[in-house]
Image (cartoon, rainbow, N blue to C red):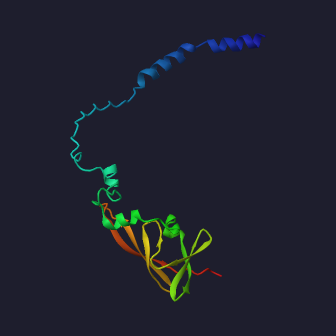
Amino acid sequence: MAVAVLSLAGCGANTEELTDWMEQQKRAAKPSVQPIEAPKKFEPHPYSVIALVDPFSAQKLGTGTRLEGGQGNPILAAQLRRRKQPLEAFPLDAMKMVGTVSRQGRPHALIEVDKLLHYVKVGEYIGQNYGQITQIDETELTLRELVQDAAGEWIERTTTLQLQEKAR
């Protein structure tokens, strides 16, 4: 027990030197904090394009498909009035031309969509861009589509669907 008392007595003795050293270190340590910049004054600028047509407005998006008394594109108006054909529900990239067949002297193309074969002929519509088949060859099918350009105008473009043979 005498050893324990002496060891505890040694912990309490001479703490004055430790306290002086800690005070000296506190005085020597100087934080280096840089001052924060003053906030910049906010200057509002007028929104100068407010008078222009918003590219995402219903007015801009609906200009190509609206039929107001024949003011729209007459080619598009005719497309909107006709009954849709079954292959117009699928995009062209989901279709594969897998062959051609001649029926009654006219060429027909074999189109595979969702693992089903469809016979198509010149004049029928396929794809989601009002694509009408204009020509069928042994290796490709040509069609005319109606698409909107960057300005929102409806234009015609020619597209082909190539014959795709299965790899063996």
Left or right for 159, reference 139: left
The x, y position of residue 133, in whole percent, is: 45, 77
Between 34 and 120, which is closer to the camera in this rendering? 120
Q: Quadrant of the C terminus?
A: bottom right
Q: Is residue 98 above or below residue 56?
A: below
The x, y position of residue 5, in whole percent, is: 72, 10
Q: Quadrant of the N terminus?
A: top right
The x, y position of residue 164, in whole percent, is: 55, 79
Residue at image position (29%, 49%) is 54
Could you tell me if residue 158 is visible in this image?
Answer: yes
Residue at image position (35%, 71%) is 156
Give the residue furthest to the bottom: 105
Left or right for 120, reference 40: right
Residue at image position (70%, 15%) is 7
The x, y position of residue 94, in whole percent, is: 54, 68
Q: Is residue 103 above or below residue 14?
A: below
Q: Is residue 14 above or below residue 91?
A: above
Q: Is residue 138 above or below residue 11?
A: below
Between 18 and 125, which is closer to the camera in this rendering? 125
Between 101 and 25, which is closer to the camera in this rendering? 101
Could you tell me if residue 138 is visible in this image?
Answer: no
Residue at image position (54%, 87%) is 104
